[in-house]
Amino acid sequence: MAAVETHIEHILQLPAGTTWREYAACTGRTKLFFPPKAERPQARERREALARMLCTACPVQAPCRDFARAHHEYGFWGGESEEDRHLAGFTVAAPIGVRARAAASSATPRPSDAAASPDAA
Ligand code: SF4
């Protein structure tokens, strides 16, 4: 991965010996970019909207996004949520939005559930 980071830093023309991380606009804002335990969907939307605003103004958004995609990172990186990366084809093990939809759909009985039920016979 060092080769990728070196390539990105060459494109950005960062000063020698520095990395894109040193120019991150989110330094010290960890709570804005990673969810607390049991975060409600509405709170996540608000938190990620604020994170997205910060990313939009960040000078290293592209290498940050590329890094998160390449490493299947959790949290909000480079203007993308876990679900955004999932939809772009860079899936993390269990993206938050996908988990939430799976939980919601499993709570709703489906016709196939009734057919498979012993009570359906
Ligand atoms: S793009 Fe966003 S997450 Fe990435 S370094 Fe910048 S502010 Fe942080």
Image (cartoon, helix red, strand yellow):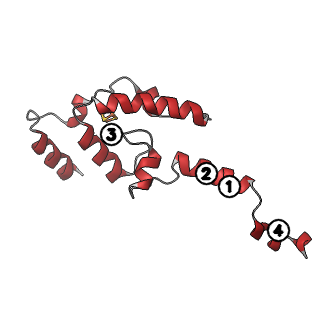
Q: Quadrant of residue 115?
A: bottom right
Q: CA distance from mark 2 to mark 1?
A: 6 Å
Q: Are the residues flagged by discs 2 and 4 in contact, CB closer than 8 Å?
A: no
Whole-percent x and y of residue 83?
A: 47, 48
- Looking at the rendered structure, the secondary structure element under dot 1 is helix
Which residue carries the number 4 mark?
114
**Residue drawn at (24%, 52%), measured in percent from left and top?**
1
Relative to 52, say whether 67 is above or below: below
Q: CA distance from mark 4 to mark 1?
A: 15 Å
**Residue drawn at (32%, 25%), measured in percent from left and top?**
27
Q: Are the residues flagged by discs 3 and 1 in contact, CB closer than 8 Å?
A: no
Q: Mark 1 and ligand 1: say if the CB distance to the nearest ligand atom is below 8 Å.
A: no
Q: Are the residues flagged by discs 2 and 1 in contact, CB closer than 8 Å?
A: yes
Amino acid tagged 2: Arg
Q: Earlier along the polypeptide chain: callout 4 or callout 1?
A: 1
Amino acid tagged 4: Ala
Which residue carries the number 1 mark?
105
